[in-house]
Image (tube, helix red, strand yellow):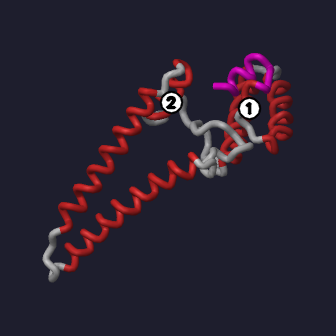
Amino acid sequence: MAAIKSLETENLNHVLIWIPEDGEKELRGIFEKTLHARKAGKEAQEVADDWFFENTIRLHRAGEGAPYTGLKPAGLSEGPVVPRAEKAIETGDPKETIDFILKTVENDLTHRFHRVLEKKEYDVNDVDAGREYIQAFIDWVVYSHSLYTSVTDAAAGHGEHNKGKTGCGHH
């Protein structure tokens, strides 16, 4: 984690790249106080480090437009995509990430589509069954449209990760 490296090296720049520009001044002040407090003993160091980590994550999340929900335990699952995406950056090969995402989307779309087909033939006098069909229909169409617009908006530059804010999606 970049915040740990910043404390170990006493160089805020390791973590500063994850913080939006408008949070830099605040984090610099917190960092200086943290470095000072770390010299007051082991317990003070633990408290200061946690305070620094909490504020680093809070400022990073604010840059994403997301709420700060507290520190998460180390090793908490980031899901299956984040490790693959990070590995792709390390290896320079995105194939595993792309294949995984495409297969996941394909499986989900196929499941939703088959659910529509299962519900499509219903007795007109069974209103509950008709509603189940309509719900499956809406789920299929809206989800398909949402996936498409998410991809096309991002490709057009409209879905960038809060450009000018931060560059991280995991915490």
Does residue 77 sit above or below 159 in this rendering?
A: above
Residue 144 shown left or right of residue 32 in the figure: left
Other residues around mark 2 within 10 Å, as few (<14) / some (14–19) / many (≥20): some
- Furthest residue toward front: 156
Q: Measuring 80% from the left and 37% from the top, which residue is drawn there?
A: 27
Secondary structure type for disc 1: loop
Residue 113 shown left or right of residue 55 in the figure: left
Other residues around mark 1 within 10 Å, as few (<14) / some (14–19) / many (≥20): some
Q: Is 54 colored magenta in this rendering?
A: no
Looking at the image, which is closer to me, 156 or 55? 156
Q: Which mark is residue 3?
A: none
Residue 110 shown left or right of residue 1 in the figure: left
Specify the segment rendered in magenta: 1-13
Where does residue 151 sit, x and y in percent of width and height? 50, 48
Q: Does the magenta stretch mainly form a helix, a strand or a loop? A: helix
Does residue 123 sit above or below 49 in this rendering?
A: below
Q: Quadrant of the N terminus?
A: top right
Q: Which residue is mark 2?
A: 85
Q: Measuring 51% from the left and 52% from the top, which residue is drawn there?
A: 150
Q: Measuring 78% from the left and 26% from the top, which residue is drawn there?
A: 13
Q: Amino acid at mark 2?
A: Ala
Does residue 8 sit above or below 119 in this rendering?
A: above
Comparing labels 1 and 2, the label whose residue is closer to the camera: 2
Where does residue 149 sit, x and y in percent of width and height? 50, 55
Q: Which residue is mark 1?
A: 17
Looking at the image, which is closer to me, 131 or 114? 114
Residue 56 shown left or right of residue 21 in the figure: left
Q: CA distance from mark 1 to mark 2?
A: 19 Å
Where does residue 24 sit, x and y in percent of width and height? 82, 38
When asked about the image quadrant of residue 125, the answer is: bottom left
